Image: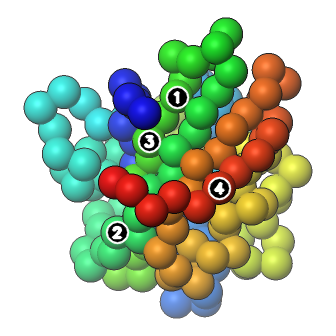
Amino acid sequence: MDFKIITTLCYIINSQNQVLLVKKKRGFGVDKWNGPGGKVEPNESIEESLIREIKEETGLILQEKKELGFIEFVWPKSLQDWNTRCHIYFCRDFVGEPVESEECLPQWFYFDQIPYDQMWDDDKYWYPDVLRGNEIKKRFYFNEEKKVCSFEDINNN
């Protein structure tokens, strides 16, 4: 499967064992909570994109980070331009305090208070594993209503 959109997401965990989520203020996913990250730009590596996006969206500078794998999002034919491969990272070592940006509002959440009802429909299926630092390789299929139809574990790159 060919994915024209490549993105990153990073799950940043603080010393109180809270995850940093951002509420999008504009663009794709507006008014939804998600991990910080974004599109990989032309001539930019995945890791360069991750570092840039986190700094732009939250003001944080990542130190040690771990790539956990990826998730592929497959949309119906009418929305196939949204098909995306998203590289997932996990980080407990960062510098700075989150600050609001033009694009999003960052907020710390305890794991049992994550606002799944204000997030993408797929998040409830894979967040618990990622928040434990587990590797992930999944493909999610969405319908026209932007709800998950099905998902599967995948073993290819």
In primary-sequence order, the first of circles 4 and 2 is 2
- What residue sits right under mark 4 in the picture? 152
Q: CA distance from mark 3 to mark 1?
A: 7 Å
The structure's colour scheme is: rainbow
| Residue occupying the point 68% across, 21% down | 76
In primary-sequence order, the first of circles 4 and 1 is 1
Q: Is residue 33 above or below residue 13?
A: above
Q: Is residue 147 left or right of residue 88?
A: right
Pointer 2: residues within 10 angstroms few (<14), some, or many (20+)? some
Q: Is residue 44 visible?
A: yes
- What residue sits right under mark 2 in the picture? 67
Q: Are marks 3 and 4 in contact (CB under 8 Å)?
A: no
Q: Secondary structure at mark 1?
A: loop
Q: Is residue 144 left or right of residue 92?
A: right
- What residue sits right under mark 3 in the picture? 85
Dividing the picture into quadrants, the one containing residue 80 is top right
In primary-sequence order, the first of circles 3 and 4 is 3
Image quadrant holding the N terminus, namely top left
Which residue is most to the left?
43
Place of residue 151 in the rendered image (x, y in percent of width and height, measured from the top left): 70, 51
